[in-house]
Amino acid sequence: MRLAEAYASATADEIEAALAGGKLILYSVGRPPSPDHNVTRSSVLAEYNFGSPAFDDAKTPVFAENGVVALHVGTPGWARAFSADGGVVADFSAGAGAAEIKCDSISATPGFPLKVLSLKIALPAETATYEKTEFGHVYVTGQDNPYRKLSVRG
């Protein structure tokens, strides 16, 4: 999970409160370096509207509808969560393995439902640094593992 700058020091309870009535958009690949960057190269797979409150007592996400119809073909790779006023709160990893968001399918197909099974708010959040090189690449390093890097063109 990577938090937007406005939520950098937020607690799990504050993040859950910010998501109440907000939105979760599930994307394929092409995750931006941070939630403060625009989404430029990723397809929207599905959109979920959080209930209010956004999580129940068991910390399970509550959506107005869970099992929304997928919009495009793709493999869930990440998701962006928004507050009710449209502000970006956080980006989450999605998929199999150690992903923060787990879905009921490993791929999305237009016209078929895609359900979020779990969403984990993992604090402390991952921080990312980035810099442009002479070739126009951005290298993002996760704080939890200094050897993990992501190269983004542009």
Image (cartoon, rainbow, N blue to C red):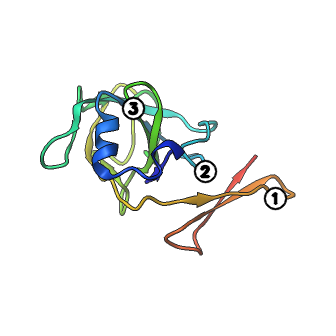
Q: Disc 2 on helix, strand or loop?
A: loop
Q: Disc 3 on helix, strand or loop?
A: loop
- Residue 47 x %, y %: 38, 29
Left or right for 40, reference 131:
left
Mark seen at residue 54? none
Which quadrant would residue 37 be assigned to in this image? top right
Quadrant of the drawing holding the N terminus: bottom left
Q: Is residue 127 above or below residue 26?
A: below
Q: Is residue 105 above or below residue 135?
A: above
First reached walking from the N terminus: tag 2 or tag 1: 2
Q: Is residue 1 above or below residue 42?
A: below
Instruction: Identify the amino acid type marked 2.
Output: Pro
- Residue 45 x %, y %: 44, 34
Instruction: Identify the amino acid type marked 3.
Output: Ser
- Residue 131 x %, y %: 74, 57
Q: Disc 1 on helix, strand or loop?
A: loop
Which quadrant would residue 60 be assigned to in this image? top left
Mark seen at residue 133? 1
Of badges 2 and 3, nearer the viewer stands: 3
* Mark pair 2, 1: CA separation: 15 Å
Mark seen at residue 83? 3
First reached walking from the N terminus: tag 2 or tag 3: 2
* Residue at (36% x, 62% y) in the render: 97
In this rendered view, identify the residue nearer to me: 89 or 140. 89
Instruction: Identify the amino acid type marked 1.
Output: Thr
The residue to which callout 2 is attached is: 33
* Residue at (29% x, 32% y) in the render: 20
In this rendered view, identify the residue nearer to me: 110 or 147. 147
Residue 105 in view of the camera:
yes
Of badges 1 and 3, nearer the viewer stands: 3
* Residue at (85% x, 56% y) in the render: 135
**Callout 3 crowding tier (Cα within 10 Å): few <14, some 14–19, many ≥20:** many
